[in-house]
Image (spheres, rainbow, N blue to C red):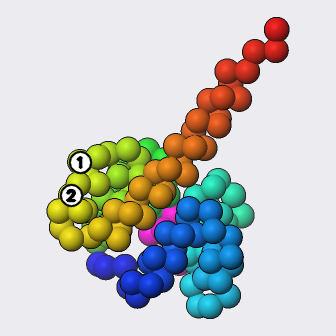
Amino acid sequence: MKMEYPAKIILAWGEAIGGNTEIRDWLMKNGYPELGIFVFALNNQEEARNWLMSNHQEHLMAMIRGAEGDKNACLWLRKFGFSIMEKMARAADNDDEKLHELMNEGNNDFATLALKMRSVKNQIEDDNNDVHKLNFS
């Protein structure tokens, strides 16, 4: 199964993932609410995660979970024919082999999305680790 979005929408999605709030909001108001809400869900906003699940966007939520290291989410994506999204999830979870597979298969736009997702997830992880390392002495 393919992700059925025009190339310019995939490009806009990547910009939204990268932090462009104007483009994120544009996606939400112009027929692609799932992609705008995906950005909130990627940033651990529970309401957005629930929205994805309640609005038949389980594949997007599975990709986020896979990017967070949930192997079962990746298996679910593969089982239901979302092989590109499975590779994107694994690449976003720091799997460089899957990133190279995407590029070698000519899916550079999806590889770019995976790298943007990786950057967000790694920043969240770093921020969480920094909080746990604080020393108040």
Q: Report x, y in % for residue 98.
A: 26, 53
CB under 8 Å between callouts 2 and 1?
yes
Residue 52 lies in the magenta-colored region:
no
**Which numbered dot is residue 97?**
1
> What residue is drawn where x is 55% and y is 52%?
120
Disc 2: which residue: 101
> What residue is drawn where x is 23% and y is 54%?
100
Tell me the quarter of the image containing the C terminus.
top right
Q: Report x, y in % for residue 91.
A: 35, 52
Quadrant for residue 38, please give it.
bottom right
Using the image as rendered, state which of residue 75 and residue 17 is in the foreground: 17
Q: Mark 2 packing: few (<14 Cα in 10 Å), some, or many (20+)?
A: some
Q: Report x, y in % for residue 12.
A: 52, 77
Instruction: Report whether residue 70 is seen.
Output: no
Figure check: 129 above or below 36: above
Helix, strand or loop: magenta stretch = helix
> What residue is drawn where x is 48% and y is 57%?
117
Q: Report x, y in % for residue 132.
A: 68, 25
Magenta segment range? 56-61
Amino acid carrying label 1: it is: Glu
Q: Residue furthest bottom?
A: 30
Q: Secondary structure at mark 2?
A: helix
Q: Residue furthest left?
A: 104
Figure check: 72 above or below 13: above
Q: CA distance from mark 2 to mark 1?
A: 6 Å
Amino acid carrying label 2: it is: Glu
